[in-house]
């Protein structure tokens, strides 16, 4: 029976990494219209808000002395996003290119209401700004990379045709004048990140006769945001080398890898990759592996011929000889033949001696014999 000494210590665990949110391209809507849940003045040519081409959706009216008029919502929907299903929505940014027409002293056009459209309904927190619309085309930005507009989102909500934005303007005058709201372009950028699966329940190393087995488990079958696991190895915690990649199966929550060539001291770390292939460090462990197989050799001595024959269970690559104080022997001669080492002990004083055998697979065996 081979004897193995194994020590395991947990260095770090549960290390979480959060990446910056990714951004979609600024995207145009495909469906435009009026929503009469606010205001009285409807928009004309609503589809002209699709592109920045100097063709405008407009809402204009003669506004009476010292009064104001509110437009209905100009709605832009069906943006055709394809946010991955394993993502978390960080924020939504809406850009509107618009200007005011017919301005005179004492008149203005301002935001009346800017809200998000979710599942076809105007909802969420108010995003309108207090500044007046300019007299020439300029983009105004609403929301942002960390602004969810007062409601929770799933990728399916964003990808649905019923996702969009609703914009209402307020036309105000001190003297009767015909004012017109112009919107040339509406575009939306969505910021999202990938959900991080929880770290494994454990990461463990177990010594085997042929190497070290690495085991880990998750609390349940991996969600869609985990693609695979990476096992890396280092002799010093500074220089790491990938030794295995293990796919995250839909029906599997227990995983295993194997290192067939461990050194005496080994550091292993486990990482998992999400659907964006970003690697997240979970655990690092240390394992000490003693590959001295005490019962892997047999020694046969012949006092008459002044020889000791060592029989090993593996092919021998080299042999080192020492006295009991582990001082190298210069006088003893040794010949190797496959799994046997023949030591000429002539000239050695009586006492105990030690042989260290290194095999072709870099395993280490030790043997002791006595010279009479």
Image (cartoon, rainbow, N blue to C red):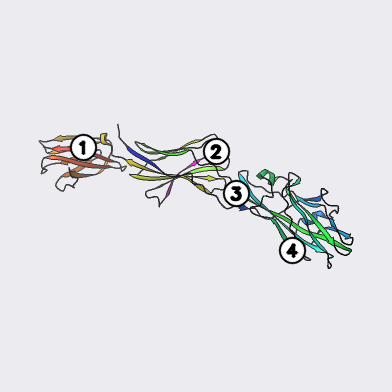
Residue at the top extreme? 1
Front of the two marks 3 and 1: 3
Q: Is residue 243 magenta?
A: yes
Would you name the residue on which mark 1 appears?
A: 310
Residue 241 in picture, x, y percent from top left:
42, 49
Left or right placement of residue 248 versus residue 82 in this view: left
Residue 138, which numbered label? 4
Instruction: Using the numbered discs, state the Cα–Cα distance from disc 2 to disc 1 in whole angstroms.
Output: 52 Å
Q: Is residue 188 above or below residue 5?
A: below
If the image is split into quadrants, where does the N terminus sit? top left
- Whole-Å distance between the Cαs marked 1 and 4? 90 Å
Residue 140, above or below 192? below
Crowding near pointer 2: few (<14 within 10 Å), some, many (20+)? Answer: some
Determine whether the residue tagged by mark 1 lies in a helix, strand or loop: strand
3D distance between C-alphas at marks 2 and 4: 47 Å
Residue nearest the viewer, comparing 232 with 202: 202
* Tag 2 secondary structure: loop
Q: Position of residue 60 (x, y in %)?
A: 86, 59
Give the spatial CA distance, label 3 vs label 1. 63 Å
């Amino acid at each position: 029976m081979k004897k193995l000494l194994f020590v395991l210590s947990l260095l770090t665990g549960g290390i979480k990494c959060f990446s910056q949110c990714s951004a979609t391209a600024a995207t145009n809507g495909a469906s435009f219209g009026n929503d009469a849940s606010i205001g009285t003045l409807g928009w004309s040519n609503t589809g002209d808000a699709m592109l920045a081409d100097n063709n405008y959706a407009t809402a204009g009216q003669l506004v009476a002395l010292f009064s104001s008029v509110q437009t209905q919502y100009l709605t832009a929907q069906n943006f055709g996003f394809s946010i991955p299903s394993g993502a978390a929505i960080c924020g939504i940014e809406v850009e509107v290119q618009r200007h005011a027409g017919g301005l005179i002293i004492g008149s203005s056009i301002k935001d009346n209401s800017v809200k998000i459209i979710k599942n076809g309904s105007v909802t969420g927190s108010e995003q309108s700004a207090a500044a007046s619309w300019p007299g020439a085309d300029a983009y105004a930005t609403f929301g942002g990379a960390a602004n969810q507009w007062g409601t929770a989102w799933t990728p399916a909500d964003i990808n649905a045709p019923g996702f969009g934005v609703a914009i209402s303007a307020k036309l105000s005058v001190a003297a009767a004048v015909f004012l017109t709201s112009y919107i040339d372009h509406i575009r939306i950028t969505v910021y999202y990140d990938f959900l991080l699966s929880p770290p494994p329940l454990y990461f463990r190393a177990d010594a085997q006769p042929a190497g070290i087995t690495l085991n880990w488990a998750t609390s349940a079958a991996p969600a869609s945001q985990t693609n695979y696991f990476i096992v890396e190895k280092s002799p010093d915690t500074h220089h790491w080398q990938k030794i295995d990649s293990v796919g995250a199966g839909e029906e599997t929550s227990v995983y295993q890898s194997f290192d067939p060539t461990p050194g005496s001291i080994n550091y292993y770390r486990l990482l998992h990759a999400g659907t964006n292939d970003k690697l997240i460090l979970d655990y690092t462990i240390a394992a000490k592996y003693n590959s001295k197989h005490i019962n892997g050799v047999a020694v046969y001595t012949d006092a008459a011929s002044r020889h000791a024959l060592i029989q090993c269970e593996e092919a021998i690559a080299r042999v080192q000889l020492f006295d009991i104080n582990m001082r190298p022997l210069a006088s003893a001669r040794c010949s190797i033949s496959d799994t046997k080492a023949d030591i000429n002990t002539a000239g050695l004083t009586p006492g105990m001696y030690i042989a260290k055998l290194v095999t072709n697979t870099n395993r280490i065996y030790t043997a002791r014999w006595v010279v009479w």
